[in-house]
Image: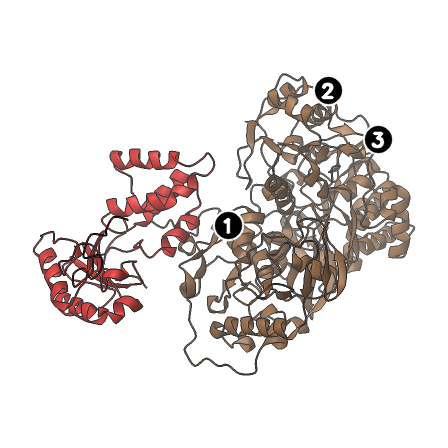
């Protein structure tokens, strides 16, 4: 259900937002009408996860509960409900391979096994150096460019085994590979070139 | 008022009622798991599906508002098939462990599976397994059995107001738990055991103790606080196995506090089952005759003014009446039922009752709590105030210690100076009370159990009169008692008579040797060291402080072992019934006093419970009607006087250890240790 961390880790005793994030959080909270501040729980949890390096320590949830006047269990319910929140440390690059039907039909099995063999881990595991975590994801909404995977905030689309390994290699070298389609097409333009609207439509 | 057709029958239900309620009104039974009339509607179990004409699919009746002209069918093949489908889904993951499940025999799922279940399963996959969750010493969890109705989640959020239980993860992985499996800290937590429709949450102390069909069920009244919750005592042989709530809309609805529910193991420990007489400085077992003889030897040569009697918190009205009459025959005016040293005026009943009534709290729109923490003094009453808060448009204010009452409130101050300011109109809250349609105040024992209690009682009356709390159709003056026996004793006049001594007077008299004999009727909360000079008789059920100090101990019956009357803080007369016999030589309390009166040569004029109850009704007419409230007439009470500036403090310091029965209970000791912070370690997120 959730990704296993690379090894033993400790829950930090305390957590507080950086001054910048604190100001941001206050701005987010102020968007909601008085008495409805609890609505800010998801953006705040997300910001805390980013600050903590990709996962949500309990201390961060406690801090947010305090900020929004909620009981701990209510924050915990939200954090456990959404799969985007990681309750244990994950690798620096969280690789989420979409395996839902459209991607699967277009070869997500190949993408997933390429990930497994390149990283040397199974699904829901983290590499020993803490660089990569691998998980399967449900449809991420890029079916038109299937198969695809999401690494941290970026989508990598139109993958095959070679393209997948290339992206992972680049990340392992510390580079930032270009996101989006890996087959060279622009966004979701037709894969083999345009088949319709080849000539300007005459004036009518 | 929509009118709709249920199974061809027209019913009219109030605006806002649901289809399920309309079906019930029409006499059709609707199976349900998640729906509960006292909780918000969740609509997630889908068991209450019914057919609605013109709807393409069955509808969940609990979540569908009843509307004019609807046509509902509850017993068609479509409905049956739909419910069978729901039941099949519920049973996919529910273990077949009924033979080892404590809910067996009183399980909603079991009962409804008989009606809607199949005789075999079409699923070959493994059932999901969920680890047990720690919820503290009261609630045992077997979460594999959970069907995710979320009644427990809604109960802690809405009724208890503590938001401790929640549903984490999602879909098939959803689990009901507390945050990091901390113990549930609510004082009403036991009610989730009754609410759970399956065996996921069961009673830990009662685990594997009995099956419901083996138990003898006796309807009775609770004595652990002055609310007088209606209970059912389940016994097997000579043992009380558990206590469950009984429905009473005007008192406890269908909830009881954890103390009421779980202190019953205290009825088995520390019991006094034979008489004792102190010989050579040690209490030694004795026969009834020897004990009575010892009392006669020590008391018959005393003047009436040298004798005093104190009635305890759990004393039933019959025993108090018998003791009062005995004291009268002995010529003693030294009687006291207020062990906590409360000094309110006892001349007018309106001054010592909860006049608004517990159900009346729901009409109030301004509530002033003075020197009381109802959450620990009367947990069920506090739940009623919270219910009022949830309806909205109410102003709740507290004068006294800062406490967490489970609902937001305004804290006006800690001491009597605030009351003075409200009484003379200079405090802004005076205007709130004056402008309210139904204002009420609750005076707690923290405000009356002090040297200037009488003056504070008078000051509270002044607030009630100047701020319009008392009208022909509304009485907003309330005294909240903490002891079940208190109001009954007050009604019977078990208070210092002409020239009699109050609690302080009795204790001082005993120190100075002016009081030579003290009769304690289950009184354990006083400072026993002050009785050193006197001959002490203790009559009661448990070996607590009183019995340790006593020279003669008479074994009495606990509340489950006698047919007796208690009057709750509202002035509601309620009768408990004997669920089992007292242990050993112990007897019902009034019969002990009747027998003793014979030995002392002051025979009391009643030989049966009926005669005694007649005599009680002669003393106080309210005893003629059971379970009714006779409104007390407003009359002047209290006194003018100097008031110290000392802040108010609640007299109940530990909710779980307020009387001899809970002090003898292991379960209560465990809860007390947990809540005082010792047992549970901080978990890393604290701090």
Q: Callout 2 environment at 10 Å: few (<14), some (14 to 19), or many (20+)?
A: some
- Which colour is chain B painted? brown
User: Which element type, helix, strand or loop, lies under badge 2?
Assistant: loop
Tell me if B215 is positioned left or right of B663 in this view. right
Q: Is residue B32 above or below residue B436?
A: below
- Check if mark 2 and mark 3 are on a common chain: yes
Residue at 58% from the left image edge and 70% from the top image edge: B109
In-front residue for pair A137/B156? A137
Q: Which chain is red?
A: A
Residue at 58% from the left image edge and 48% from the top image edge: B159
Percent of width and height locating residue B342 = 69, 34
Percent of width and height locating residue B3 = 74, 55
Disc 2 marks which residue?
B640
As drawn, the residue found furthest toward the front would be A204
Disc 3 marks which residue?
B498
Residue at 30% from the left image edge and 69% from the top image edge: A101
Total numbered badges shown on the rendered structure: 3
- Check if mark 3 and mark 1 are on a common chain: yes
Q: CA distance from mark 2 to mark 3?
A: 21 Å
Q: Callout 1 environment at 10 Å: few (<14), some (14 to 19), or many (20+)?
A: some
């Amino acid at each position: 259900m959730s990704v296993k961390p690379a090894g033993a880790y400790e829950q930090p005793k305390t957590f507080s937002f950086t001054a910048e994030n604190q100001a941001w959080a206050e701005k987010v909270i102020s968007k909601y009408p008085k008495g409805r501040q609890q609505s800010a729980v998801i953006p705040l949890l997300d910001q805390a996860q980013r600050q903590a390096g990709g996962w949500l320590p309990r201390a961060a949830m406690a801090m947010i509960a305090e900020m929004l006047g909620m009981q701990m269990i209510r924050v915990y319910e939200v954090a456990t409900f959404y799969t985007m929140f990681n309750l244990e440390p994950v690798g620096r690059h969280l690789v989420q391979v979409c395996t839902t039907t459209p991607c699967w039909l277009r070869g997500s099995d190949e993408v997933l096994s390429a990930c497994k063999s390149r990283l040397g881990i199974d699904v829901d595991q983290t590499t020993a150096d803490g660089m990569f975590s691998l998980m399967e994801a449900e449809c991420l909404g890029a079916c038109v460019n299937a198969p695809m995977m999401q690494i941290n905030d970026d989508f990598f689309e139109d993958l095959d085994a070679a393209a997948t390994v290339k992206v992972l290699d680049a990340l392992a070298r510390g580079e930032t590979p270009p996101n989006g389609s890996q087959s060279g097409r622009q966004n979701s333009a037709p894969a083999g070139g345009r088949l319709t609207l080849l000539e300007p439509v005459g004036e009518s | 008022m929509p009118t709709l057709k249920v199974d061809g029958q027209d019913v009219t239900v109030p605006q806002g009622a649901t289809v399920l309620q309309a079906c019930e009104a029409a006499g059709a039974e609707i199976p349900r798991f998640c729906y509960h009339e006292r909780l918000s509607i969740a609509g997630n179990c889908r068991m209450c599906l019914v057919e609605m004409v013109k709807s393409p699919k069955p509808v969940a009746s609990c979540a569908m508002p009843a509307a004019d002209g609807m046509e509902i069918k509850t017993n068609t093949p479509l409905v049956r098939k739909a419910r069978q489908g729901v039941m099949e889904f519920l049973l996919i993951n529910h273990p077949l462990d009924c033979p080892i499940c404590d809910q067996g025999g009183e399980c909603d799922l079991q009962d409804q599976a008989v009606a809607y279940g199949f005789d075999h399963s079409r699923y070959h996959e493994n059932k999901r397994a969920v680890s047990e969750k720690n919820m503290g010493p009261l609630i045992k969890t077997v979460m594999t059995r959970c069907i995710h109705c979320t009644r427990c989640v809604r109960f802690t959020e809405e009724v208890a107001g503590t938001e401790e239980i929640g549903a984490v993860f999602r879909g098939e992985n959803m689990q009901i738990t507390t945050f990091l499996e901390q113990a549930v800290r609510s004082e009403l937590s036991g009610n989730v055991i009754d609410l759970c429709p399956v065996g996921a949450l069961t009673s830990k102390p009662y685990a594997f103790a009995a099956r419901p069909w083996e138990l003898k069920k006796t309807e009775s009244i609770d004595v652990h606080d002055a609310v007088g919750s209606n209970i059912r005592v389940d016994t097997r042989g000579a043992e009380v196995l558990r206590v469950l709530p009984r429905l009473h809309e005007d008192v406890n609805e269908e909830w009881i506090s954890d103390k009421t529910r779980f202190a019953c193991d205290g009825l088995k420990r520390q019991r006094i089952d034979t008489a004792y007489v102190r010989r050579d400085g040690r209490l030694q077992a004795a026969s009834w005759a020897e004990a009575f003889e010892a009392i006669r030897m020590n008391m018959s040569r005393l003047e009436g003014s040298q004798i005093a009697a104190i009635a305890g918190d759990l004393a039933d009205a019959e025993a108090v009446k018998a003791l009062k009459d005995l004291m009268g025959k002995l010529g003693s005016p030294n009687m006291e039922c207020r062990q906590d040293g409360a000094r309110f005026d006892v001349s007018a009943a309106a001054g010592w009752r909860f006049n608004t009534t517990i159900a009346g709290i729901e009409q109030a729109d301004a509530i002033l709590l003075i020197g009381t923490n109802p959450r620990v003094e009367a947990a069920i009453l506090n739940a009623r105030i919270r219910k009022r808060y949830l309806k909205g448009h109410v102003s709740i204010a507290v004068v006294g210690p800062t406490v967490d009452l489970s609902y937001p409130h305004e804290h006006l101050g800690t001491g009597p100076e605030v009351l003075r300011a409200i009484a003379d109109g200079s405090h802004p809250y005076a205007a709130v009370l004056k402008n309210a349609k139904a204002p009420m105040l609750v005076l707690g024992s923290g405000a009356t159990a002090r040297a200037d209690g009488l003056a504070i009682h008078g000051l509270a009356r002044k607030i009630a009169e100047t701020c319009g709390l008392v009208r022909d159709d509304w009485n907003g003056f309330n005294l909240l008692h903490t002891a079940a026996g208190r109001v009954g004793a007050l009604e019977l006049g078990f208070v210092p008579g002409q020239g009699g001594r109050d609690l302080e007077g009795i204790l001082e008299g005993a120190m100075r040797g002016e009081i030579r004999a003290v009769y304690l009727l289950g009184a354990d909360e006083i400072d026993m060291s002050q009785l050193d000079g006197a001959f002490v008789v203790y009559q009661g059920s448990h070996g607590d402080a009183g019995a340790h100090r006593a020279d003669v101990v008479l074994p009495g019956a606990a509340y489950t072992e006698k047919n007796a009357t208690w009057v709750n803080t509202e002035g509601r007369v309620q009768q408990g019934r004997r669920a089992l016999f007292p242990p050993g030589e112990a007897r019902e309390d009034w019969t002990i006093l009747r027998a003793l009166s014979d030995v002392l040569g002051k025979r009391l004029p009643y030989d049966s419970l009926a005669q005694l109850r007649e005599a009680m009704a002669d003393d106080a007419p309210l005893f003629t009607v059971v379970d009714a409230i006779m409104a007390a007439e407003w009359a002047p009470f209290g006194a003018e006087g100097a008031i110290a500036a000392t802040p108010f403090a609640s007299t109940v310091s530990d909710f779980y250890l307020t009387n001899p029965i809970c002090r003898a209970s292991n379960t209560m000791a465990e809860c007390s240790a947990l809540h005082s912070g010792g047992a549970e370690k901080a978990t890393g997120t604290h701090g």
